[in-house]
Structure formats: structure tokens, C-alpha cells
Image: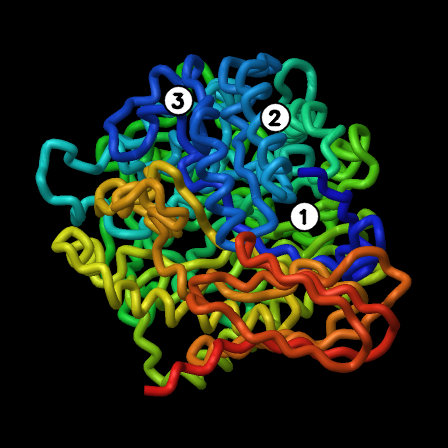
Amino acid sequence: MSLQRVTQSGSLFLDASGAQMTLRGVNLGGDSKVPYPDGGTQFPSDFADHREVSFIGRPFPLAEADEHLARIARWGFNTLRLLTTWEAVEHAGPGLYDDVYLDYFAEVARLAGEHGLYLFVDFHQDVWSRMTGGDGAPGWIFESVGLDFTAFASAEAAHVMQARYDYTSTEKRQATYPQMSWGSNYRLPANGVMWTLFWAGRWVTPDFTIDGENVQDFLQGHYLGAMDAVAQRLAHMPHVLGFDTLNEPGLGWLAQPLSYRHLAASAANPERPRIGPALAPLDALALARGCAVSVPVLTRQEDGSAAPTDERVFNPDRVSIWRDGTTCPFEAAGVYRLEGGAPVALREDAFTARNGRNVKLDDDVFAPFYARVAETIRRRQPAWSVFAEMDAFAHAAGRLFPRELPERVVNASHWYDVRTLYLKRFEPRDGLEATAARFRDELGGIASAADAFPGGAPTLIGEFGIPYDLAGGADYARWAAGQRDSLWPQHEAALDLMYDAIDALGLHSTQWNYTASNRNDLRIGDNWNQEDLSIFSADQIDDARHPDAGGRALGGFCRPYAPRVQGRTALVSFDRDSGRFELRFTADASIAGATVIYAPRVQYPDGWVVRFEGVPAEIVRDDARQRIALRALSSGEAVLTLERPPADPL
């Protein structure tokens, strides 16, 4: 299938004919964070093979590509947020790119276009790397800066499933590795060291060099080099929209006083604290050096927040995570020193001040990084957009995007309903209407950030979604017992409200996620840290010939919308109970082609009734593709509605 190039124009995405496009997609895939085939966190590992791993086969083997991409397109998605990682590209060593993987990734991207799917590339990371409890950076990076990742677990410098989980036990949920606990790594020493050097090595550790360049330039240079290697392979593909900057980056210790322990949100620091030890940067630096540190511990509360409930000593065995012969670069830079085995702060403002002024995360950290990403990818394809992310907690903490931005930047922020995500329940305490209003308010607040972008910008919610293991995976058990009707009621209700808000606000989106290797198993899920947010599971295929085989909660996300409008959209709404869909738009007959409506069988099993008024038009139904094409013959205000046909009288 040949797709017109879609480019950003102010706050809109337009195709080459000038039609307004709505990008509605899915992240592909959740297991692309880990090597293929046995790199998932359901397998024990010491990461000793980090230089030899392969990501060929993520998100799926090429022999399966058509099956999965056709299913995604059938479900109405027209866009992929296509995942890769820095490790996938450069795992073998500095500058050693995996050309076979790059060829594989480019072929997955090409095939996506054949199935009518646009895409943008997401260089994914979570809490820096697999060796620090997440994914992203290659293992040799730690060696380059002088860290020994094999010591992280014993020093309690990282919270890693493979180090805490008893793989011999039949218990799939274990107290030693609580659900959604991987995020606590952001506040632990290994993440603190790496993110601080990545963002601020030039001014915090100016004399720390690797191969003749400052550590910050070394780290960012290799990350962007991997991005450039992918960009070269995709530059000729018209359906590629651009690149994400970096998934949910951490901040290290930036903007934190050296001795400050974050125990609760405050006016000075409105960010929600995370579960785990409340380490001040000084505590973390001491722990990394091999000191035992006593600090408060925060645990998850019933409302999803974190609060201190205990205090304990960390790293009691006094294990250093610095390699033999390596000096801590922060100690060398005069940030602190050890006296009698205890840390002493020398520069309390080491991470909060720069050149005699307060650090500005937007201007000092993100603005120059966005500029480098834009420069990197646009050397290969000038038309590409930059899908910009700040850290995952930026919006909640009131942090804004930089004032200085490259041209054609998309607000690609993420949003999750925290209660559902962390508590694994969807129970609207204030009723569905109040929950719907809250979703609109939260998403609207995120979208409002784009108002300040020069020239305006679209908002594409790069991640949102729901865990499918709600209530301990109760729906898995019902499926295994043979139940096929009335599954996923909570999931469909939650997704319905989310897409209602997205429609009402006119947002673009890529749901998290589609994982081809997903299993209805509390230990496995998406193959990563027991998360399970995939809209597909191979364990739910009864009849492989059925086009919707493996789908989860289709009624919640498989819904009508207008991927292309011959003009400009004014209103989109859908009521799942009645099946009524409404599109209001200003038709522009000078734009070639038709307005396209996706009308899924999931919502219209007996077909649909189309009504159109406002201007003369030609309407073509394509039942097989679940599409309606409407070509306006003159310009003006127009309204299209879809409804389910009336039931046959008894």
C-alpha cells in the first residue's frame, strides 16, 4: 500500500493533499525492550552475555509480521510507535552497530507501510538499562564510566527482578519484587550516577573524560549515533513520521539539594515521591562508594501514593559499585568526600546550581537535547517531526517544555490513570461521569503544554493504557475456564472513557501496547517486569483463522473515528452503548480524496446506517475493510453520523 507522506503543520498533521489526519495507533511492542528469544525478565540472567545478545525477532519474527500488522490495521490503528533500544543497536561495544538487526528493523518498518501504517521510532528506555531494572542502554556503558553492574544487586544500588525473584518458586507474585516496583530505580545510585552524567557531566564533572571527550558528550553522542544508524535505514520511507526523543528519561540528581530526602510532595518540590528508599543524592553517592546508609523507606499506599513507613540500613555489606582503580567522578569534582567512612557534603548546590544560578531543567537539560535530536534525524530526512518527551513526572510536578524548541516538535507526553495502573483495579469511586471528567481534565492539562510551542503543535499521547492483569488476572482464569462472553468489562469501560476524552480533546494517541509474545501469565505478561498491558495475547487465540484472534477488550479501543478528513474537524464523538458516532467538520472540496471513517464490526456487527448532511457528497461503503469514504463535492459545514440499524421487530 502506498501512503502519502504526512507532515506536521502547526497544530495539525496533514497529508500531501492537505487533508487533516488523525493518528491513532499502538506501541509495538512491549517485549522490544529485551533480547530475543529468551531475554524476557521471566528468565533468570546475570547479563554476562550483554555484548552478544540479539534483538532480531522483536517485535516479532519477520515470518509473523504480516499476521500481526494486518491485525493491528484491522483494529483501526493507522500509526505505530515502533520501539527499539540503544542496546539493540549498539550492544557489542562503542560504535559497533548491529547491522543485521538494523536491516531487520528497517524491514519491519517497511512492512508496516505495506499495511497502511504510519510510524515514528521510539528509542525506548526505562530506568536506564536492563542491568538497572529496566531497558535501554547497553551494558558496556557502565564499564566506560567505571561502574561494575555485577555489584549493583549486592550493593542495593539497583532493584532488578532477575536478582530478587525466586524463579524456582511456583509463586508468580513475590514480596521480594512487588508489582510496579521497577520505577524505584530512578532514585537508586546506579540510575542517579548515569542520568546525572548523561545530562550534566559537562558542568558537574567537567574533568571526567572518556576517549578524550567529556562524559556527557560521550554518552549523548553514542545514544544519538545509534539513533542516526536507524535514521539512515528509514530516511526514504514516506510513512515514517519522525523520532521520539527518549522514552520517559530520568533526571538523576538534577535540581536536588545534595542532602535532601524527598519524603512528600511540597510547594518547593511538588513531585510525588516514589516507592523505595528515600535516598538523598549524598546518601546514594555514599552507598555507591561502599558505605552502609540508614534511610526511610516509602511504600505504596491504597490511593497509589508513596509514604514513609519504615527505616532501614542499605548496603550493610559495604559493597562498592565502582570498578577497582576507579575514582568516583563526583568525589573527584569536589561534590563530597568521605571522612571515617561517612559522607560529607562539600557542595550542597552541586546539582541545583549552574554558573551561579539555579538549574533550569527545561532550558539546561531538555532544550539542547531536543536540538541535538532534531539535528541528528533531519540530516537524514528534513521533513521528520521530533516527538518530544520530558521526564515522566514533569507534568505532575509543573515542569514545562523549554521555551526554545526546534521546528515541528510534537507534544508526545504520556498519561496513565495512576490508580488503575498501580493498584491493578478499575473501580471509579466517584462514578463514571466524574471519572470521565477527571480523564478529560488530566489529558487536557497535558495537551495545553503544546499551546506554548512556537507555531503550535499537535499533542500525541505517546503512551496510555491499562493493565490486563486487573484483580490478580481474574479474566485470565475466566478465559482458561472456557468463558468467552462478558470478559474484560472493567478494561473496556476504562478504555472507553480514555478514548472518549481523546476524541473530545482532538488528540492523537498510541496506546501501550501490542506485544506479540504476550501470555496470560502473571509471571510473564509482556515479558518485562511482570507488566501486562498488551491488547493482544497469543494465549487467547481459539481460532487462528479469525481476524480478531488474540484480541483483548476490543470493545474498549476498537471504535469508529476519522483517520482522514477532507477539510478540518470540529467535533468527534462516540457513544458505545448506543453505537452513535458523529463527525462534524468543515468540508473543503479543493482537497483531493475523501473523508475516511473507520467503522469496526466490533461496534457494528449488523452493519451501520450512514447519515450525512450539509454539502453534496459521494459516499462509498467498504464493508470488507470496515471503512466509509465520503467525498464532498462542495465546501461547507458537514455532519456525518453512524448508527446501528434498528432491531428487527418481533
Give the residue drawn at x 61%, y 44%: 117
Q: Which residue is mark 3?
A: 148
The image quarter containing residue 460 is bottom right
Specify the label residue 106 is tagged with: 2
- At x 76%, y 60%, the residue is 594
Q: Quadrant of the C terminus?
A: bottom left
Res. 649 in view: yes
Q: Gap in Å between the C-alphas at discs 1 and 2?
A: 19 Å
Q: Is residue 164 above or below residue 417?
A: above
How many numbered marks have been drawn onto this rendered protein structure?
Answer: 3
Q: Nearer the viewer, mark 2 or mark 3?
A: 2
Mark 2 residue type: Ala
Question: Which residue position is annotated with label 1?
Answer: 387
Quarter holding the N terminus is top right
Q: Nearer the viewer, residue 55 or 402?
A: 55
Q: Please state which amino acid type lies under the numbered disc 3.
A: Asp
Q: Earlier in the sequence, mark 2 or mark 3?
A: 2
Label 2 packing within 10 angstroms: few (<14), some (14-19), many (20+): some
Identify which residue is drawn at 52% across, 31% down: 85
> How did the renderer colour the structure?
rainbow
3D distance between C-alphas at marks 2 and 3? 34 Å
What type is the residue that disc 1 sits on? Answer: Phe
Q: Residues within 10 Å of mark 1 (few under 14, many from 20)?
A: many
Nearer to us of marks 3 and 1 is: 1
> Is residue 566 rendered to the left or right of residue 149?
right
Q: Residue furthest right?
A: 590
Q: Secondary structure at mark 1?
A: strand
Give how far across and how far down residue 7 sits, in percent: 79, 48
Q: Residues within 10 Å of mark 3 (few under 14, many from 20)?
A: some
Q: Earlier in the sequence, mark 3 or mark 1?
A: 3
